[in-house]
Amino acid sequence: MISVTQATPHRHSPQFSRIILSVAKEAPKGEETLKTYVDWHSVMAQAFAEEMGADKKPLEMTTEVPLKEQPRRIDGLAIIDDPKTVARNTIAKGLGKYSIIEFKGRSDYISVQGYHRTISYAHEYVAMKKEVSRHDVAVTIIGPRYPRKLIKYLTEELGRGLENPSPGIYTISGETFALQIVSIRELPRDEYPFLWATANPLDGEGLLRIAGKLEGEGRLSRMGRYFKAIIETNPDAVQEATNMSVTTKRFDSIMEQTGLAAKWEARGREEGLVMGLERTARNMIGMGLPTEMVVSATGLDARAIARLKKVKA
């Protein structure tokens, strides 16, 4: 179980971050050692907060917000104290004083059911908070790609209005709450670099560009979880970035600051060991030795040996 809260200063301190990320998740049981488990809610919340101008501390961002005693939680809740401090981009224009945010990770999508669930969160939030008016609440649903079925459902079955004020951003009219849907892969990469990287693969140059943006304005300390996820989901880009001699020292420094250098080296050693054992197993298979002997000599399981035999054939 992981429980992390960013922004350690006291709430009433002038240095209080106003960007708070609370995570309470654990990887599903049965996950393999080398398989990456990414908590996209907290990762995308960090990217979202940064796109909204986190360096100016414009909003308080909390993830996994409980709505009641039962496990029913809002992915993200952004509370804006001073609208003047929020980044001036199209997504920010669609936020309310209280914004209910649904995040869909790289392999997920925005569904009709997800839309209804998120809208119900907004209704429930207003019902819980006597001081909150529905006019102060907005809903933002962020996913990796254009939700074709949902847009068709909203416009044709529900008769909602649809506008596309900027690439990747769709505003829906006729709802109880202001609603915008964000398709990350359509967003301009230069305008929303952090969100863009959550849904698109990076090469070495792209990874270095993200790393460079994280170096300034205290972003690295705010977005450690985000950067770790980007590293974990772009292993080829890490290798490519490491081999780019012009920027190696700067990239190595960022990896050290985030504690990823030692982890990445250990992972490389572990993967190298597995590759070595598989090479030995292939040689033994080529010699016609029985599976039991190959398993005993390498420590690989019978399924791995069967897979290697199939590849060799």
Image (spheres, rainbow, N blue to C red):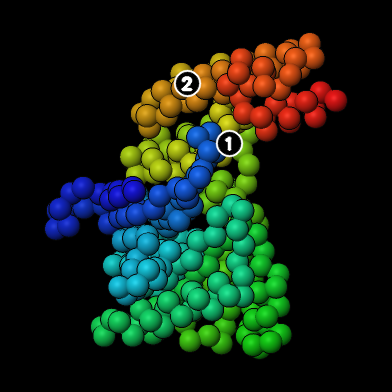
- Residue beneath label 2, please? 265
Is 113 located above or below residue 9 in the figure? below
User: What x and y, as percent, mark residue 147?
Assistant: 66, 67
Under tag 2, what secondary structure?
A: helix
| Residue at the (48%, 41%) spot, across then down | 229
Spatial CA span between label 2 and label 1: 15 Å
Is 202 located above or below residue 81 in the figure? above
Choose top left, top right, bottom left or bottom right for residue 63.
bottom left
Residue 273 relative to residue 8: left or right: right
In front of the other: 165 or 138: 138
Residue 254 relative to residue 4: left or right: right
Is 220 located above or below residue 127 in the figure? above
Is residue 85 something one can see in this rendering?
A: no
Q: Residues within 10 Å of mark 1 (few under 14, many from 20)?
A: some
Amino acid beneath label 1: Asn
Is residue 173 something one can see in this rendering?
A: yes
Is 96 located above or below residue 248 in the figure? below
- Residue beneath label 1, please? 234
Amino acid beneath label 2: Glu
